[in-house]
Amino acid sequence: MNTTVMSPLTVTPLDFIPDFKNATLVPFNETACENWKEIHHLVFHVANICFAVGLVIPTTLNLHMILLRGLLTIGCALFIIWATLYRCALDIMIWNSVFLVVNLLHFIYLVYKRRPIKIEKELSSLYKRMFEPLHVPPELFQRLTGQFCNIQTLKTGQAYAAEDKTSVDDRLSVLLKGKMKVSYRGHFLHNIYPCAFIDSPEFRSTQMNRGEKFQVTIIADDNCKFLCWSRERLTYFLESEPFLYEIFKYLIGKDITNKLYSLNDPTLNDKTSKKIDRQPSLCSQLSVMQMRNSIASTSDSEDGLQMFLRGTSSASSLRNNQQEFYNAYGVSRLQHDVFC
């Protein structure tokens, strides 16, 4: 019996040229689209419209991510409805359920971050006057005032600090309500009004030197309420928040400048101090505590103190008498010149 074996390999002559003109197209598989199926349900198209709108929202829009996640969540929910009611496709329903949960969680988190921050009524004036103009976010201010600090009160006549007795290392405070007066050896120096630091000169001067005492007496002239930070914990917190650290440097420097005005014009009232507070700072930084210490060490006589208290509030006269002021009381410039 003769058998013929067909080899799967065929040899093509070198001079063979295929005839493409008479070639016929053959489908790659049996599932090639010969006839289009009917259009899907309206729910399917609305879901895709949600996806498309979410993806074309400009990123410059303030609520861009919230809108994107919201539309993706709606689109996934519509896909689940379409796959369940009109296609009976279990796999499509399961995948879109997963996507729905992920986008819904993101949406809830973004909305939570955008919630309005409620600042305590007692601290609202402090935020609006000192921190809001410097673009400190409410949530950052809430973190600053919600930890390692408390609100304390003093009745009229009670002392916040006593000369040569109270340590300056423990706290930093801002007056919220009332008025305090600062004196040295019984002589009035200046007042402290709401939204002003109580011990900013001491805070600035003792950052490198610990264990010092107040050289002035600070007494409540009215029923006072003040916000008090633990100095050690505040310093640690500011080290982890560079933006807030720079804000504090600016606010304390500005507060010290206002106290310089007050030292040269003891009659400066709250209205005038607010007006000065809005003006550009005369100097970068000034240690009033060093000024106070210098007065304490070099002006034991009553004449020297009275000469200091009679200083004028005008910047021009301060410049004219600046050298005499230094020579008389030995006040040094710690970091920058006193006058710009």
Image (spheres, rainbow, N blue to C red):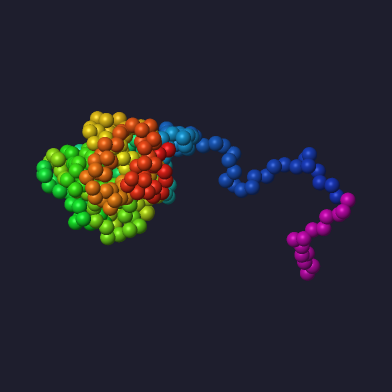
Q: Which residues are magenta?
A: 1-15
Viewer-closest of 48 and 108: 108
Q: Residue at x 85, y 50 (%)?
A: 16
**Quadrant of image for the C terminus:** top left
Q: Whole-percent x and y of residue 315?
A: 36, 33
Answer whether residue 3 is magenta in the image: yes
Relative to the observer, which residue lies in front, 208 or 99? 208
Q: Is residue 259 magenta?
A: no
Q: Is residue 4 visible?
A: yes
Q: Nearer the viewer, residue 250 or 336?
A: 336
Q: Quadrant of residue 81?
A: top left
Q: Which residue is drawn at the image coordinates 75% and 42% (left, top)? A: 23
User: Image height check: is 87 above or below 53?
Assistant: below
Relative image position of residue 50 (x, y in whole percent): 43, 35
**Based on the displayed image, in which of its 4 quarters is residue 120 positioned?**
top left
In the rendered image, the vertical position of residue 125 relative to residue 101, given as above or below: above
Tell which residue pokes out farthest to the right in this image: 15
